[in-house]
Structure formats: C-alpha cells, structure tokens
Amino acid sequence: MNSSDLSIVHLVLNASFVVQIVLALLLCISVASWSAIISKMIGLKQVRTRNDEFEKDFWSGTSLKDLYSAAVNNARVAGPMERIFASGMREFQKLRERHITDGATLIDGARRAMRASYQREMDEIESNLSFLASVGSVSPYVGLFGTVWGVMHSFTGLASLATVTLATVAPGIAEALVATAIGLFAAIPAVVAYNRFARQIDRVAIQQETFIEEFSNILQRNVGAQAGQASPQ
C-alpha cells in the first residue's frame, strides 16, 4: 500500500456505490449552500445600503410628498424601508381621499399597511435562511450514514480474510470517513453563515420596526396639526 492509495480521489473512486451516492449528494448540497450564502451576502448588503440611503433622505428634511413620489418612481430599485414607507403613505392618502378625518383611523390604516409590507419584506429577506439551517443540521448525519455504511461494507469484505492487518483495514475505514469529512465541510459554513445572517436580519428588522413607529408618530403630528388649523378660532 503506497501513499497514493489513501488520497482523497483514490478513496472516493474506490468507495462503495452507496458511499459514492452520499458523497455526490453532499457535494451538491455544499454547492447549493455556498450559492445561497453568496446570494444572501450580496442581498443583505444591498438591503442595508438602500435602507441607510433612504433613512438619510427621510431625515434630511425632504417633504413626505417628494419622498413618496421618488419611492413610487423607483419602486423596482427601492429598498425594503422605502417600500414600507410607500405602503404607509399610499394607504394614508387613500383614506384622506375618502374624506376620513378621524386621526386614529388614518394612523391605524397607515400602520397596518406598513406592517403588512414589513412582513412581506422580511419574508423576502429571510428567504434561503431555513435552507442553510437545514444544511447545517442534516449534512453531518448524512455524512455519518455514509461512514457507517462504508465501515459495514469494509468489515464485510474483511470477513473472508484469514489475517487482518492495519494495511487491510485502513483503506476501507479511510474511504468511509471521507463521507463524514464532506458532511462537516458542507455543514460548518452553513451554520456559520446562518448565525451571521440571522444577526444581520435581526438588526434590519429592528431598524425597520423603529422606522414604522417614527413615521407613524410623524403622521400623527401632521394629522393633529391639520386638525388644529381646521378648528374654529
């Protein structure tokens, strides 16, 4: 037995059919996991950038009407926070067009519209996160299954031998352990990425929830100011 007999490629090519199927499955899962990780990394960076840009514009003193017009015109490239704002303003204006003057009704309608939009945005932001969690939790067990099967297959083959040495046992055990190694290779990045993305998404959620409350307070002050101007002197 030479060193090349224990190379990864040699072990994989000479593994049992079931172990090869497990390895192929784990490699496909790993590729899909890395694709999801890269996609989510880029997507979250865009979300944070667009939210920060809109929040900067929102507090720069630009009128709500101008912000709403810009949000409608840039709907395709707008960030989640800008779309939440547009949903609230749209509902607020619709209620005003129906000649609803009750402040509580106006604010409640805008808040509910923003909450619905917020939930849609969060569903989109959290997409593929459950896939990474599944990869992180299931891949080691899939690899362990391949290892157990490989060990069983190896020992079955050794049963017919009169003498068993380390040289005869090592290749079979090594090829079985490759499945566990590939399973961990698929699982570890998925777990690390899931934890990192979960923290980033929590921060995005808090930022957007805070904006909803702040924008609701601004609408409430505007409604109160308009009601005061309309009241008889």
Image (cartoon, helix red, strand yellow):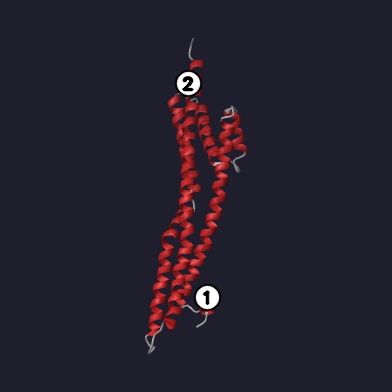
Q: Quadrant of residue 141?
A: bottom left
Question: How far, Cα to Cα, is label 2 from label 1?
Answer: 76 Å
* Mark 2: amino acid: Gly
Closest to the observer: 85 or 174? 174
Name the spot of residue 161 as percent of width and height, x first.
Answer: 39, 88
The image shows residue 233, relative to residue 14, as above or below, that is above
Q: Name the residue under label 1.
A: 7
Closest to the observer: 10 or 76? 10
For image coordinates 47% across by 47% down, the residue present is 123
Q: Mark 2 points at which residue?
A: 224
Whichever of labels 2 and 1 marks the residue nearer the N terminus, that label is 1
Res 203 label? none
Q: How many marks?
A: 2
Name the spot of residue 180 as percent of width and height, x first.
Answer: 44, 68
Q: How crowded is mark 1: few (under 14 residues within 10 Å), some or many (20 or more)?
A: few
For image coordinates 61% across by 30% down, the residue present is 66
Q: Are marks 2 and 1 in contact (CB under 8 Å)?
A: no
The image shows residue 105, relative to residue 202, as above or below, that is above
Q: How crowded is mark 2: few (under 14 residues within 10 Å), some or many (20 or more)?
A: some
* Mark 1: amino acid: Ser
| Element marked by disc 2 | helix
The image shows residue 131, relative to residue 70, as above or below, that is below
For image coordinates 44% across by 56% down, the residue present is 133
Please state if 63 lies on the left or on the right of 22 as rendered. right
Name the spot of residue 46 as percent of width and height, x first.
Answer: 57, 45
| Element marked by disc 1 | loop
Name the spot of residue 225 as percent of width and height, x first.
Answer: 50, 19
